């Protein structure tokens, strides 16, 4: 499973990129709005930091508007993936963009049927929002399992991009279920690296070494 980082914050992306495990970036209008900077400038800066796919979301509600935005976004970086919402208009735009060879990410997926439709429209990625399903008392990870079953049944190449990740258990389950990608907020990505026993283990090793009087270059 690949990790993408779910943020539009350049400092977070720069830091996470230096860790060597981030393969791409996902943004959405809420994340970009938090940065209070021109959209294009943010995406161009991300593109200088990350070689992989960068999802950029359209704002129009009609397919023609989405296509217009998509063609503009595609000039910002060769890595741009166009995020369209899971609506009839979004799928119309996805189908057209896929015919043009432009990568797409169909977002706001809440059922396996929606994922199936997006795959049939030629989506490169589908983004099921697991945390938002948990928020309304449903089982977000069950959706990942359902989509994996459907996609495997028909050999769809569309990748499952687990989104709306809220804690490390979502990440582990996504990997166990065969999600192709998990897009993870910076804070949670950082949590994945840590364990208190790793920290105390390092402290103990160093303390024992110090006590022994051995040199560190031995
Ligand atoms: O990028 C979309 C997504 O990951 C949203 O997450 O936490 O706003 O539900 P959240």
Image (spheres, rainbow, N blue to C red):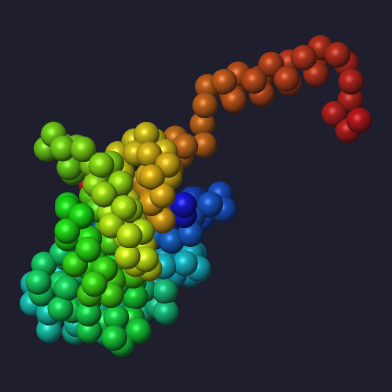
Q: Position of residue 161 (x, y in %)?
A: 34, 56
Judge by depth and name the residue closer to the eye, 132 or 59.
Answer: 132
Residue at 38% x, 39% y is 173
Please state if 5 lies on the left or on the right of 132 as rendered: right
Rendering coords of residue 47 (x, y %): 44, 70
Point out the residue furthest to the bottom here: 100
* Residue 39 location (% of width, % of height): 27, 69
Residue located at (38% from left, 45% from top): 177
- Residue 19 at least partly seen: yes
For residue 168, side relative to residue 129 (left or right): right
Number of residue marks: 0
* Picture quadrant of residue 32: bottom left
Question: Observer-nearest residue: 13 or 116?
Answer: 116
Q: Which residue extends farthest top?
A: 211
Residue 15 lies, with reference to residue 33, above or below; the image says above
Q: Is residue 34 visible in the rendered structure shown here?
A: no
Q: Taking 31 as reference, is 177 left or right? A: right
Q: Residue furthest front?
A: 153
Considering the image in quadrants, where does the C terminus appear?
top right
Residue drawn 56% across the image and 49% down it: 19
Q: Quadrant of residue 169?
A: top left
Q: Residue at x 88, y 33 (%)?
A: 217
Q: Is residue 8 above or below residue 64?
A: above
Residue 115 picture location, percent across and down: 22, 60
């Amino acid at each position: 499973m690949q990790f993408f980082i779910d943020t539009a914050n350049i400092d977070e992306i720069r830091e996470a990129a230096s860790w060597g495990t981030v393969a791409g970036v996902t943004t959405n209008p809420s994340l970009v709005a938090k940065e209070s900077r021109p959209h294009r400038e943010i995406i161009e800066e991300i593109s200088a930091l990350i070689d992989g796919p960068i999802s950029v979301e359209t704002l129009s509600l009609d397919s023609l508007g989405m296509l217009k935005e998509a063609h503009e976004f595609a000039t910002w970086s060769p890595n741009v993936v166009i995020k369209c919402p899971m609506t009839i208009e979004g799928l119309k735009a996805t189908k057209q963009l896929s015919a043009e060879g432009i990568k797409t990410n169909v977002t706001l997926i809440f059922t396996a049927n929606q994922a199936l439709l997006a795959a049939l429209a030629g989506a490169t990625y589908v983004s099921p929002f697991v945390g938002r399903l948990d928020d309304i008392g449903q089982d977000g990870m069950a959706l990942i399992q359902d989509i994996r079953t459907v996609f495997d049944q028909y050999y769809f190449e569309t990748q499952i991009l687990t989104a709306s990740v809220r804690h490390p258990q979502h990440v582990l389950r996504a990997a166990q279920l065969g999600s192709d990608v998990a897009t993870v907020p910076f804070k949670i990505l950082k949590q994945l690296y840590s364990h208190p026993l790793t920290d105390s283990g390092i402290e103990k090793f160093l303390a024992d070494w110090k006590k022994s009087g051995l040199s560190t270059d031995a």
